[in-house]
Image (cartoon, rainbow, N blue to C red):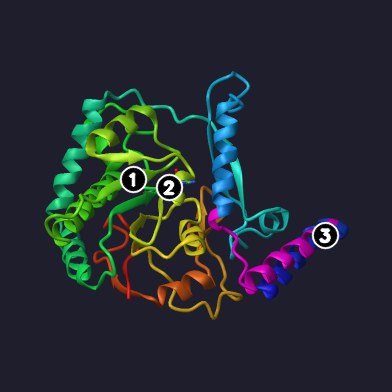
Amino acid sequence: MHKRLESAVSQLLNDGHPSEDLATDRARVEKYIDAYEEGKLFFGRDTLASLDRQIDALRAAGAVGDYNGDGGVVTLKDIMTHMSTKYPEYLLEAETPLAIGYQHPVEPSGRPLCDLEAAFRAHQASWLASATCKSLTTTIAASVATLRAPINKIVCFGLGRLDEWKLTNTPEELAKSVERAAWQHAAALTMAETLTRAQGGGGDEVRCYTQDPVYADVEKQLLAALGFEILEDPKGFLAVDDRTLVFSVTPNVPVRQIVADMVWPAAMVWDVIDKDRDDEGEREWRTDMNEGLERRISPWFTDEGSIRITEMGQHYTFSPLPGDLHKNNFGSLGIYFRK
Ligand SMILES: C[S@@+](CC[C@H](N)C(=O)[O-])C[C@H]1O[C@@H](n2cnc3c(N)ncnc32)[C@H](O)[C@@H]1O
């Protein structure tokens, strides 16, 4: 990590950044790296509970609004996660691993709820008929026998929008826009049903909770009708305990790092955990050209890994979610159950 910081500083010096500012920023980042290496928690339960109280207080005071006085969304912002050397200037400017951010409320496209539900149901039917669904349910049903205690809830993070970003003309365009999110929400419902059934009669129904600051009101109505309970950010994190299955797919907030610091859940279905991090200091950005500009695209575009997550992963069984990661609507996901 220090090596990576070193090269970030050199790059910024070459770019003409003032050396005095860099020295202060560098000292702060070094402190974070050392704290992490000493085992200090970045995202402990107390920290998340405090952020939650601060956000609630902002809402209660009506302090959440833009210059037009419109209501906004207060949410957690990924500032400096363990490996957030995404952009050297970003890392060195960060004053804290996680901050409270403000974003404009998400506009519904204007599609009526019945259209959104029809699009969701069509995708749900394809999901239920898929080989990926069969494989996921088989793995989950087989893994239940090894659980220390039954799983009583699924908490989802960052599964995305069930509405279009912009109103389009055709049902096909709507269907395309919501496909990934629909498959992912449908998968959460399937996992809940599978767990409820596999954990045997008499037990409580496994419920689905979901957190994504991007849901507009009409999506919240759809989600409620589908059986989800929506949790405002960061209440989802506070709901996770050792009887939870956590489900997330490339969230724009470091879900795995936060969960790893808070509690080890009974199970996770989330982005595949690195087997080791031996080369993390040397990993380089893969770049892509987009509209004539070079963009950094991987690794660590979202939900960055960390040494702590890798260590946690060693205490779980692992089964990959099958399918072509570019076409399966989930990417590279792993199914993890506590050993
Ligand atoms: C890259 S998108 C992935 C969406 C979807 N899972 C997919 O695979 O297409 C990242 C998602 O993370 C969500 N997100 C950002 N901050 C979040 C937070 N604090 N809690 C939960 N989700 C968050 C975004 O709103 C967005 O839906």
Residue placed farthest to the right in the image?
20
Which residue is denoted by mark 1 in the rendering? 209
Mark 1 residue element: strand
Q: Is residue 173 visible?
A: no
Q: Position of residue 137 (x, y in %)?
A: 17, 61
The prevailing secondary structure element of the residues shown in magenta is helix
Left/right of residue 94 with respect to residue 125 in the rendered view: right
Q: Position of residue 30 (x, y in %)?
A: 73, 67
Label 2 within 8 A of ligand 1 by Cβ: yes
Name which residue type carries label 2. Answer: Gly
Residues at circles 2 and 1 in contact by the CB criterion of under 8 Å? yes
Q: Position of residue 254 (x, y in %)?
A: 50, 56
Left/right of residue 39 with respect to residue 275 in the rendered view: right
Compared with 129, 123 (above or below) is above
Which residue is denoted by mark 3 in the rendering? 24
Look at the image and give the residue range highlighted in magenta. 21-45
